[in-house]
Image (cartoon, coloured by chain):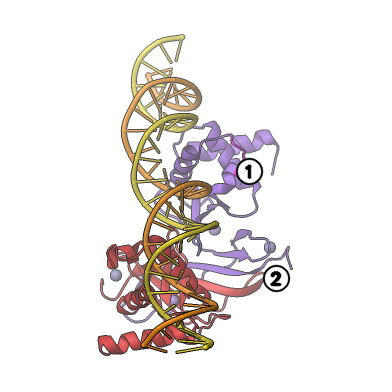
Chain colours: A red, B purple, C yellow, D orange
Amino acid sequence: MGTKQQITERIAGILRESKLSVTETRTKILELFMKSNGALEHSDFEKLAGQSFDRVTVYRTLQTFLDKGIIHKIPTTDTSVRYALCKSECSEHHHHDHHIHFKCEECGNTICLDETDVPQIQLPKGYAAHNVEVVVSGVCKSCK
Amino acid sequence: MGTKQQITERIAGILRESKLSVTETRTKILELFMKSNGALEHSDFEKLAGQSFDRVTVYRTLQTFLDKGIIHKIPTTDTSVRYALCKSECSEHHHHDHHIHFKCEECGNTICLDETDVPQIQLPKGYAAHNVEVVVSGVCKSCK
DNA sequence: GTAAATTTGCAACAATGTTGCAAAATAAAA
DNA sequence: TTTTATTTTGCAACATTGTTGCAAATTTAC
Ligand SMILES: [Mn+2]
Ligand SMILES: [Mn+2]
Ligand SMILES: [Zn+2]
Ligand SMILES: [Zn+2]
């Protein structure tokens, strides 16, 4: 992990690489992602960071991070959207998160299983696949 | 398909099997599912059926259909939720929709690929899988 | 048919998401 | 460092989406 200072430096580096101004809100939000061991949804930021930043700013920050390939979305069957940090291979123009996601029914946590490859899907004739999203639900290691 | 009359009868049958009153709204909503060749989201009902039923009633009807195993949800990365008819094996207590979903980037349609099995996923040690959701996006047969 | 049970529609509200714009913060230039 | 240009933020105002209670209407059971 590193010291608080080192983390802040690393975050600033990520932002600069994406040609984004290094602001307090962006730094805090990235920090939350790094501290969290799972995906975060919009309401988590208000909870985790208290009322320290504006709702609108959070929306805009998440959208910016998505655009720049810093975070990715994880599909859900409720109306929420979950976000998680991308690996470094993602960029403004291409996401390369070829991993699956796991949602624990006990603790509610959603995590990226970076080591687990997305399976090949044999689609019916006539269909072209661009992207495959896999979300497995069940019981996680910690809750077992 | 059958005549309008036959469809209405079939729908009434589905409702009675689930011990639900046969009402106009429920019948219309099931009709929309049957006519549609893809998944529907909440706003579709208001569009497709005009202003013929109340928003609250639609929410409650969809929730009831979910509870009874008449429809299932399909995960998305936006805040919408899509719904599609279950096959007859689903019941109040168990959904058995072991198929994947396809979302076309051209026409926006989401369909159930009933013939395509959900792949086996090899999870890391310690994780127990209860359910696997697969959503493939790309270009569908019609849009190719 | 009537009575009982269920469903609906409305109002009122809560939660979530979007837009425009002036003030503040950050980055670039001098 | 100071000034200027650019970007970001916070707020207000609004739009959309989802929830709850309850009386009226509909459906089912008798
Ligand atoms: Mn991920
Ligand atoms: Mn389906
Ligand atoms: Zn867990
Ligand atoms: Zn298509």
Query: What secondary structure is found at the residue carrying circle 2?
Result: loop
Residue located at (60% from left, 69% from top): B137
Task: Classify A81 as above or below A142.
Answer: above
The structure residue drawn at horizontal position 57% and vertical position 81%, both measured from the top left corner, is: A94
Circle 2 Cα neighbour tier, 10 Å, few/some/many (<14 / 14–19 / ≥20): few
- Say whether residue A1 is visible: no
Tell whether circle 1 marks a residue whose Cβ is less than 8 angstroms from ligand 4.
no
Where's ligand 2: which quadrant?
Answer: bottom right
Q: Which residue is mark 2?
A: A125
Camera-side residue of B132 and D12: D12
For badge 1, the amino acid type reads: Leu
Q: CA distance from mark 2 to mark 1?
A: 30 Å
* Residue closer to the observer: A4 or B125: A4
Mark toward the viewer: 2 or 1: 1
Count the marks: 2
Q: Is residue B133 left or right of residue A7?
A: right
Q: Position of residue B42 (x, y in %)?
A: 53, 48
Q: Is residue B123 one of those drawn in magenta?
A: no
Of the pair A31 and A72, the residue shown nearer to us: A31
Q: Chain of mark 1?
A: B
Q: Are marks 2 and 1 on the same chain?
A: no
Residue B144, labelled with which disc? none
Region in magenta: B47-51
Query: Which residue is disc 1 drawn over?
Result: B48
Amino acid beneath label 2: Lys
Is A37 rendered above or below residue A103?
below
- Marks 2,1: beta carbons within 8 A: no
Q: Position of residue B27 (x, y in %)?
A: 56, 36
Magenta-span inclusion, residue B49: yes
Q: Quadrant of the N terminus of chain A?
A: bottom left
| Label 2 chain ID | A
